[in-house]
Amino acid sequence: MRPGLPLLAFLSVLAAAPALLPDFYITLLNYVGLYSIVALGLVLLTGVGGLTSFGQAAFVGLGAYATGYLTTAHAMSPWLALLVGLAVTAAVAVVLGFLTLRLSGHYLPLGTIAWGISLYYLFGNLEFLGGHAGLTGIPSLEFFGWKLDDGRSFYYLTWATLLGAVLATRNLLDSREGRAMRALKGGALMAEAMGVDTPRTKIVIFLIAALYACISGWLYAHLQRFVNPTPFGLHIGIEYLFMTVLGGAGHVWGALVGAGVITVLKQWLQDILPKIFGQSGNFEVIFFGVLLILVLQRARDGLWPWLKRLVPGRAARRVLPEADPLPRRSMPSAGTVLLEVKNARKQFGGLVANNDVSLNVIAGEVMALIGPNGAGKSTMFNCISGVDPVTRGEIHFLGQRIDDLESRQIARRGVNRTFQHVRLLPTMSVLENVALGAHLRGHKGVLPAAFHWERVEEARLLAEAKRQIDRVGLGDRLFDEAGSLPLGQQRLLEIARALAADPCLLLLDEPAAGLRYQEKQELAGLLRRLRGEGMGILLVEHDMDFVMGLADRVVVMEFGEKIAEGLPEVVQKDPVVLEAYLGGVEG
Amino acid sequence: MDLQIALLLGQDGVVNGAIYALLALALVLVYAVTRVIFIPQGEFVAYGALTLAAIQAGKTPGTLWLLLGAGVAVALVDAFVALRDSRPRRLARIALWNLALPLAVVGMARWLEPARLPLVAQVAFALAIVVPLGPMLYRLVYQPLAEASVLVLLIVSMAAHLALVGLGLFFFGAEGSRTPPFSDARIELGAVAVNGQTLWVLGASVVLIAALYRFFGRSLYGKALRATALNRVGARLMGISTTMAGKLSFTVAAGIGAFSGILIAPITTVYYDTGFLIGLKGFVAAIIAGLASYPAAAAGAILVGLLEAFSSFWASAFKEVIVFTLIIPVLLFRSLTSRHAEEEE
């Protein structure tokens, strides 16, 4: 990668700082670095994943106390103590994440508040951790014989760690796993339909954030050489979140900006405010509280987007590397029964949305599901794709029962869908959105992604995404934000995304809505080609010309019941169907 | 532990539990109506207790100036909106509620010398200072963010909490206060002596809970709040102002918070930051109820109170650890009983 000019300038200033600045500023910069590492984890958790934690300070405390205790009481090597701290932190984070992340969004922050308070009191009351007085005499770090025993020498370790973490986080976000993380904000429903295991992804980002905090705590303990409970209380945990939000929760560099601004402001306010108020106390919290309220009310994206406009940036990557095509799944031969819905019933309380509906889809055909609004077509789609399981009845795919599976497991079997109300990640590029569809065709995990060891696979995923985008005719919009496309093209994008998963059954919910005549013709052509390749397509659509020109068979639904099934020309003349669409002829 | 100690601890636990129950009810109410997780609830507890203490000590409570300041801020914001929408008629009402009312309270503080008034009047006076801060807080902090996600509202709550704790330190200083009990009566109930304040707390809690029950069940405003909690858009279509609902729920929550503070001030020393932990224990109770059910929240609160009382006897240093760790099994239970991760709005 070729770093941009502003980044080079920033790095040179950082490298030169210890030679130029007095001790006071070096100490301040050390703290900015330590806080930034924690805030960086919160960027991942809050800005990217849409979750949050007030208990990060407690994870910092775990890292600090683990090394503090082990290096003093057991004379363990600090490096080994780091590993122990990371292991303990990981265990706590996984348990806490497992408990709260399956519940709706606010249980995690509430759980972390409780956990932050508990741990703070635990640190303060355990004899072997020194109680409220804390632990002293923590050894300084040694790095291949080089003793890091003052702020100046420690500075390089702090900032190298931070920059390493920034790089790893950026790498991670620009990868298959990173796309899955960013998809969380678009709602679990869409991500699951793309095959993302959302509970696992949430736990992973919570874990990463906790581990960053733990590393920061380890550094803190060896910089300070003593630990006590105060810096790990809930209020500091809140402060970390403030840094993240102020800097810009969605941006990696925002963590540094937020940590820097809050640390410097705090220093300054602690000097000046007691003089204004005429008494001593933590009055800077009033200022921070009001500041944060204003930021959230007026500029929820924080400072970084605003700063970024001042610095000339470089253009985003525009060239895709060459890559071999991904292996494809073997298609069932034409005529195989792909999908079989047997007496599916779906009830919402007293409302019966689907009443004993049966239908099947064969490989190499387009089956159209039509009916007036409210007939239960989208409900049927949700049942088949596992978004909303059936109340009764069975659904089989290639002979295997799928009605009790999660939607990501159904996606893995080769059933992929689009949504009636488009579900895209509007700020991500067209390419990335479609690459999300290919999620299940890659296998490399978080660690290879953080070091960018998965570039070969990533290139293949992106090449596949590009191929599908070209196929639906959006090839010239590859790097545009998905949200900037007109609605009709967003629907095409969803089709490309579903195709990127290499499905054998494609579920399309009103794909032609919002398309112009020419675009509809092209879409029909594409669907015919897919049918020719042996794909089965189940189509919900209101445009009758489109449906009747394309479908091999048609199922008509009204008020949750199937009222007709057959060839398009036969169904069109069916008196029951005519009555449903046009109203009966009163006799 | 003998029976007498157990009864004493049980009494402590029930008294604290009653307070947590009140707070938990307010938290559930605010969350249901506005989706705000009302962290600053605890500050209303502390403000209520410390304002009363300041009044009794013959000092001007700092919260009085906060009331004036917040009133001016709300008046400015609302006046700006009224003028922008060219509806100058609203100005009179805005001035009445946000300027005249606080000024009247200040006036009373100057001329009535509340330190010499009977206790009931002092309590009413303290409530008159603290409770209006609730709707003002809603107007200034939450109303501009009414459509934001639960997460953003939660972060804002934390920010408001911090600012209010800082202000509490400024107004009341770092020393705690304790007020004289409402009555000196003592009743012997078999082996235990029950003192008057205990009965006050329990009685007041029961009366308040019953009043809330009637309010939600019978009154038009109560029903409007319930409707908003069930379906914001639907309520709006029926002509219920969600802003009104928000302000009303914050008024009720502030009232409950401040009154809880006044109730416990004779039992325990209240510091400027005491409210936070008390409020959070109300939260633990509310979480036990899944932030949804009022009776479950009350039951959870009594459980939290008892757990706290008994753990302070056996392992007093780890009292807070035990109480806050209680939510882990609760969360585990909730997590195992809900099949799908709920969709965020």
Image (tube, rainbow, N blue to C red):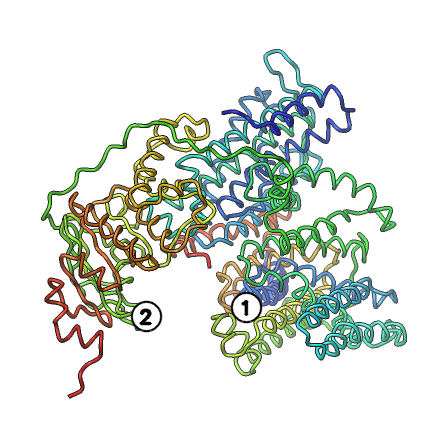
Q: Residue at x 33, y 59 (%)?
A: A420
Instruction: For marks 2 and 1, give the CA distance.
Output: 24 Å
Crowd tier of the residue under label 1, counting other residues whose Cα lies within 10 Å: few below 14, some 14–19, many 20 or above: many
Of all residues, the one furthest to the top in this rendering is A145
- Asked which secondary structure carries label 1, the reply is helix
Residue indicated by mark 1: B33
Rendering coords of residue A320 (x, y %)? 39, 31
Of residues B248 and B111, which is closer to you in this image?
Answer: B248
Of all residues, the one furthest to the front in this rendering is A518
Q: Amino acid at mark 2?
A: Gly
Left or right? Give the position of A562 relative to B78.
left
Q: How many marks?
A: 2
Q: Numbered disc 2: what chain?
A: A
Left or right? Give the position of A478 relative to B170.
left
Rendering coords of residue A347 (x, y %)? 28, 67
Q: Numbered disc 1: what chain?
A: B
Are dots 2 and 1 on a single chain? no
Left or right? Give the position of A374 relative to B187.
left
Of all residues, the one furthest to the bottom in this rendering is A587
Residue A435's image quarter? top left
Residue indicated by mark 2: A349
Q: Residue at x 74, y 69 (%)?
A: B75
